[in-house]
Structure formats: C-alpha cells, structure tokens
C-alpha cells in the first residue's frame, strides 16, 4: 500500500488532499505545525505528525517518524498581502523561509530514500499567481515562483533515479481563507487603501471562476499516480483558463 506525506494539513488544500488520499485507500501522513484534533476522519491509515518546515530538528524528527514514503506533497505555506514598498526585509525573509526554503529543506531530507529505492514522487503546490500577476502579493508570488523554477530544474537531475517532480498551481480560492490566514500588512496605508479594498473584495468573490479545495486535491492525486502528467498542473477553473491564455 502506497504512503503519502502531506504538509500543511490543518486546513484548506492540505486538509482536503489528505482526505482525498484516505478515501482512495492510501496510507496518509498528515503534518502540521500544531496538530489539531478532529480535523481529519479517524482511520487506521492516518498518522498525524507535528512538522515545522523552517526548523531543521523538526524536519529530522518528522522524516524519522515517517519512515518510508512514496509521495511527498509540499503544501505548507503562508500568504502575504502587502504593498512591496511597505514590506520589510524581515517579513519578506519570513515568507521566503516558509514557502521556498522550507519546501527545499523537506524535499532534500526525503531525497536519499527516494534515490536509494530509485522511485518516488514530489508534488509541490505553488500558485497560479505565478502565471497571472496580481497586485499586493509580490513577495508571495516570488516565493512560489522560486519553487516553480527549483522544481523544474530538480526534476531533470532526479529523473535518472526514477524520481518524478511535479507542480500543482491552484487558482483563486475564497473558501480556503487566504485573507484570514495570511499576513496582511500596510493595506490601510492611504496610498494603497483603495487598491487593497478592491483586492480583498476580489479575494472574497465567489461569483466567477474559482478554485475549490477538491480541485487541488484531485490535481495532486493525478500528479502522484500518473507519470504522464505535465510538469505544471493547473488546479481550478480559473487556473486552467489562465494557463491556457498564457500559452497562447
């Protein structure tokens, strides 16, 4: 029976992806910074582990506790809505440390077992803002674009070892509470307040094409089980449309 380890499972895409794999009879290791009871259905196939991807000791302990896995899903991340002008270097470093360096560090920790077995799949969940630029998320976009580039390069060097690496790019998802869970900084500053109000309204708008958590879970599933999936997999109707437009 195959085993998947998924980061960031306390809510949103990670939580839904863990459910998705459990429903398909996989062994699931769901990780989160602070494990919360009752966020996932009880199952003999489920293990919940504490994991902070910015902490090397936490990574070491999680990798040791997880043992052999077949698929690694790097989903953990944090959003940031902030005018670039008003974003401090320290805040930018925090976002990059979680979204970019954390993904790299956990991937690196699992690569030895994948290489030795000459098999394994790495699925990195990034964002469709790397396809269609949006205002006030420049640092967040940079952190996800870096993972895109890193993954595409890494995939080439890992292919000889039978290891696949893929990207899932979700679109706009009001239901995952990005605005509530993200850092919001400087949005009430007078020069940016009007733009910020419009951006936040768009984030909460569910009337147009949007992405649902199950769209992302399904895309991660396809990336995990189907070697024929492309390197970049859009998740959600809006992301699919944006990627099609970008390729024209």
Image (cartoon, rainbow, N blue to C red):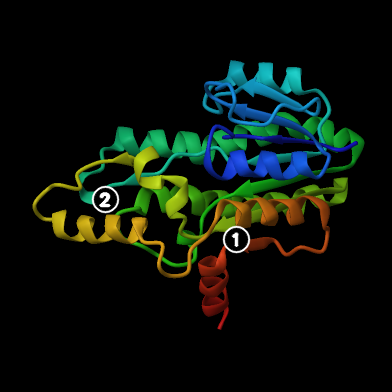
Task: Judge whether residue 203 can be spotted in this image.
Answer: yes
| Residue 124 percent across, percent down from the top left | 63, 47
The residue sitting at 62% across, 57% down in the picture is 215
Instruction: In the rendered structure, find residue 213 and report the number of the disc placed on it.
Output: none
Name the quadrant containing residue 117.
top right
- Residue wearing tag 1: 235
Which quarter shows the C terminus? bottom right
The residue sitting at 76% across, 35% down in the picture is 111
| Residue 138 percent across, percent down from the top left | 35, 53
56 relative position to 81: left or right: right
Instruction: In the rendered structure, find residue 84 and report the number of the disc placed on it.
Output: 2
Helix, strand or loop status at disc 2: helix
Helix, strand or loop status at disc 1: strand
| Residue 8 percent across, percent down from the top left | 57, 35
The residue sitting at 20% across, 48% down in the picture is 187
Judge depth for marks 2 and 1 and give the one in front.
Answer: 1
Mark 2 and mark 1: Cα distance apart in space: 27 Å
Instruction: Please count the marks in the image.
Output: 2
- In the image, is residue 107 above or below residue 37? below
The residue sitting at 90% across, 41% down in the picture is 118
Task: Judge whether residue 182 can be spotted in this image.
Answer: no
139 relative position to 153: left or right: left
């Amino acid at each position: 029976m195959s085993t998947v380890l998924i980061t960031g499972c306390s809510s949103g895409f990670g939580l839904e992806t863990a459910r998705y794999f459990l429903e398909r009879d996989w062994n699931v290791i769901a990780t989160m910074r602070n494990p919360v009871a009752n966020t996932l259905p009880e199952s003999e196939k489920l293990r919940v582990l504490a994991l902070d991807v910015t902490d090397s000791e936490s990574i070491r302990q999680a990798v040791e506790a997880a043992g052999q896995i077949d698929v690694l899903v790097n989903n953990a991340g944090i959003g940031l809505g902030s005018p670039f002008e008003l974003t401090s270097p320290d805040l930018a470093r925090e976002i990059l440390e979680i979204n970019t360096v954390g993904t790299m560090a956990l991937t690196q920790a699992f690569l030895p077992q994948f290489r030795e077995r000459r098999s394994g799949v790495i699925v990195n969940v990034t964002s469709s803002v790397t396809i269609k630029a949006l205002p006030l998320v420049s640092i967040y976009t940079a952190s996800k674009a870096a993972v895109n580039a890193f993954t595409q390069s890494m995939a080439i060097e890992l292919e000889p070892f039978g290891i696949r690496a893929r990207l899932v790019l979700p679109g706009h998802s009001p239901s995952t509470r990005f605005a509530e869970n993200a850092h919001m900084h400087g949005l009430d500053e007078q020069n940016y307040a009007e733009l910020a109000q419009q951006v936040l309204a768009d984030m909460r708008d569910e009337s147009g094409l949007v992405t649902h958590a199950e769209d992302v879970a399904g895309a991660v599933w396809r990336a995990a089980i189907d070697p024929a999936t492309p390197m970049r997999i859009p998740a959600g109707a809006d992301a699919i449309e944006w990627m099609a437009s970008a390729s024209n």
